[in-house]
Amino acid sequence: MNKKDIPNDVIRFWESNRWLFNLGNGLFGILGLILFADYFEIQEIIGLIVYALVANILYSSGMLLEMLIFTILKTN
């Protein structure tokens, strides 16, 4: 593997798996709504939306961290 290709490979890997991550988050969110629907108010629904956004930001930080590690350690 060429070191110039590492950022592209890292981005390709993380982005190709994002759908699976979002599917899992979505399923657990829907399960939570179904199981606790009697107790949900608008604040909880807004909290779930904020959780989904923050989870995706943290997922993206994994990609950035991996590229940083490759850059610092210069590993293959």
Image: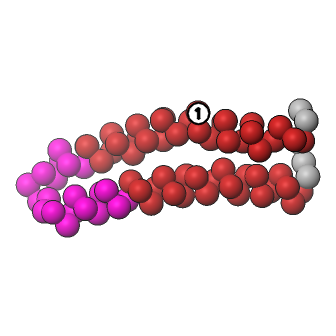
Q: Position of residue 73 (x, y in %)?
A: 89, 57
Is 42 located above or below residue 56 in the figure? Answer: below
Name the residue: 58% across, 52% down: 60
Instruction: Residue 14: name its quadrant.
Output: top right
Q: In the figure, is residue 58 to the left or right of 11?
A: left
Residue sitting at the far left: 38
**Start and end of the magenta stretch?**
32-51
Q: Quadrant of the N terminus?
A: top right
Q: In the figure, is residue 33 to the left or right of 23?
A: left
Dot 1 alpha-carbon crowd within 10 angstroms: few under 14, some 14 to 19, many 20 or more: few
Give, as a three-letter code, the residue at label 1.
Answer: Ser
Q: Nearer the viewer, residue 73 or 39?
A: 73
Q: Position of residue 47 (x, y in %)?
A: 29, 63
Q: Position of residue 18 (x, y in %)?
A: 52, 39
Q: Secondary structure at mark 1?
A: helix
Name the residue: 14% across, 59% down: 40
Give the residue at mark 1.
Answer: 16
